[in-house]
Amino acid sequence: MSALSLTSLVILLYVSTAYSARLLPLESEATTWSSRGGGSLRTQLDEVSCRTGNPIDDCWRCDPDWETNRKVLADCGVGFGHNAIGGRDGELYVVTDSGNDDPANPNPGTLRHAVIQDVPLWIVFDHDMVINLKEELTMNSYKTIDGRGFNIQIANGACITVRNVSNIIIHGVYIHGCVPTGNAIVRDRPDHYGMRGMSDGDGISIFGGTDIWIDHCTLADCDDGLIDAVYGSTSITISNNYMLNHNEVMLMGHSDDFLADKNMQVTIAFNYFGEGLVQRMPR
């Protein structure tokens, strides 16, 4: 399966030698501005000193009120996935419960309950969390998982599936130890659940997804791929991520014979391909 030989697959590949992603979700690194507006010399100097040259980070981090203005992130994307707005037009959903994962009937306050809703949601967290999923986390459209400000881990269990949905942003999450799960009932919308077959054990699996942006995540040690985009997925940006300790890192298109992948468009920018990686960077 030499997916990169697809003649119309477009990948823009930039590898940043200066590691701009971090192992843990980021706090603001903005300097203190002397004023929010105006043209004072101090304001101009502080803004310049904050900038890194990374267009994604420079778009939001220099705002000392970034935590209040979280949704600005949705306008900071680059490349083929830049139209992904996630949950920008919806309410904030605060995840308060890192346990009690019930794949068939998710509990309010859990990440699983948030991602299956039928309305746009910008999902944030109220404390550091290690989330152990019993079955794959199947996302609904127009969702942002925003881990900024806390150490948010999805670890040592099932991980994330983006299947036939659009407008997904995943930012600032540490995803590791993903394993195959399945042959179980999983709810993917408030009014729908069904039997899921076995998953592959990917960190993030994208099947037929469009307008997807994965940014500033750390991914490691999964059974299959760290990020796989297949079955007609397109309009994707994978940026500022740190990937390490893994064999098959990233798969773009699962087969040369699958025509729906012919026009796949993916931007891979400012990522750090770290220690312990073997192959598919990307394939």
Image (tube, helix red, strand yellow):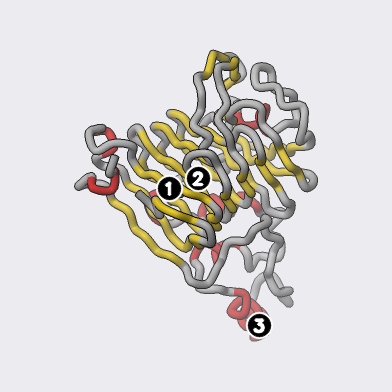
Residue located at (62% from left, 42% from top): 177
Residue 250 on image: x %, y %: 43, 47
Q: CA distance from mark 3 to mark 2?
A: 46 Å
Q: Mark 1–mark 2 contact, CB under 8 Å?
A: yes
Identify residue for label 3.
40
For residue 6, side relative to residue 194 (left or right): left
Q: Amino acid at mark 1?
A: Met
Q: Quadrant of residue 122?
A: top right
Q: Residue at x 58, y 34 (%)?
A: 179
Q: Image check: 175 left or right of 3?
A: right
How many neighbours does mark 2 have within 10 angstroms: few (below 14), some (14-19), or many (20 or more)? many
Mark 3, Cα crowd under 10 Å, few <14 / some 14-19 / many 20+, is few
Instruction: Mark 1 or mark 2: name the one nearer the start of the chain.
Output: 2
Please state which amino acid type lies under the numbered disc 3. Answer: Ser
Q: Nearer the viewer, residue 90 or 254?
A: 254
Badge 3 element: loop
Q: Secondary structure at mark 2?
A: loop
What residue is pinned by disc 2? 226
Q: Are marks 3 and 2 in contact (CB under 8 Å)?
A: no
**Mark 1, residue position:** 250
- Name, please, the residue furthest toward the left: 7
- Say if 160 sits above or below 17 in the image: above
